[in-house]
Image: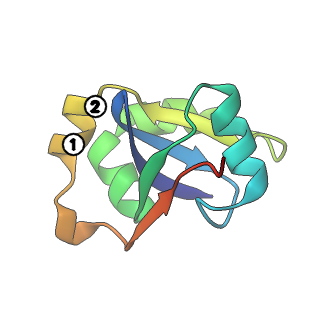
Amino acid sequence: MKAMMLISGSGPMVILTSFESATDAALIELLAAKGITKFMAYEVPLELARERYGGHFQTVTSNLHETDDLRVLDYNGNRAFELFRFNELGPQVIHEPQD
């Protein structure tokens, strides 16, 4: 499982996913189905996300199944942005749909 901060037109959000990369075609398809087609993504160290979200992290992952490819950990962009410093995040990945 990976944690990622996505920054899209609607603001930052933190997701949990079983995909290895934000550029995985299947993840991009799942995000597009939710209206997220253009974004910047940063990996969040999983243990850091677990520490910062505490009980909420446990609640979101408690009924996670092997077939769950995408879970939203935090859709409150302000809180997501405040919980992590940029130097704690992985390298930036950019996705923009091809026309």
Left or right: 43 in relation to 88? right
Decide if residue 69 is in sight here. no
Badge 1 is on which residue? 81
Q: Secondary structure at mark 1?
A: helix
Q: Position of residue 34 (x, y in %)?
A: 63, 25
Which percent across, then down, holds residue 28? Answer: 68, 47
Residue 3 in the image: state x and y as whole percent. Answer: 49, 54
Q: How is the image coloured?
A: rainbow
Can you name the residue that lies furthest to the front here? 99
Q: Nearer the viewer, residue 67 or 40?
A: 40
Q: Is residue 24 above or below residue 56?
A: below
| Spatial CA span between label 1 and label 2 | 6 Å
State yes or no: discs 1 and 2 in contact (Cβ < 8 Å): yes
Q: Amino acid at mark 2?
A: Gly
Q: Quadrant of the N terminus?
A: bottom right
Residue name at image x 63 percent, y 37 percent? 31
- Where's residue 38, x and y in %? 50, 43
The residue lying toward the viewer, choosing from 83 and 92, is 92
Q: Residue at x 28, y 31 (%)?
A: 77
Which element type, helix, strand or loop, lies under badge 2? helix
- Residue depicted at 27% across the width and 39% down the height: 80
Q: Count up the numbered dots.
A: 2
Residue placed at 70% from the left, 55% from the top?
Answer: 18
Residue 65 seen anywhere in this rendered image of the structure? yes
Residue type pointed to by label 1: Phe
Apparent side of residue 76 relative to residue 61 in the rendered image (left or right): left
> Crowdedness of circle 1 by 10 Å Cα count: few (<14), some, many (20+)?
some
Q: Which mark is residue 77?
A: 2
Q: Residues within 10 Å of mark 2 (few under 14, many from 20)?
A: some
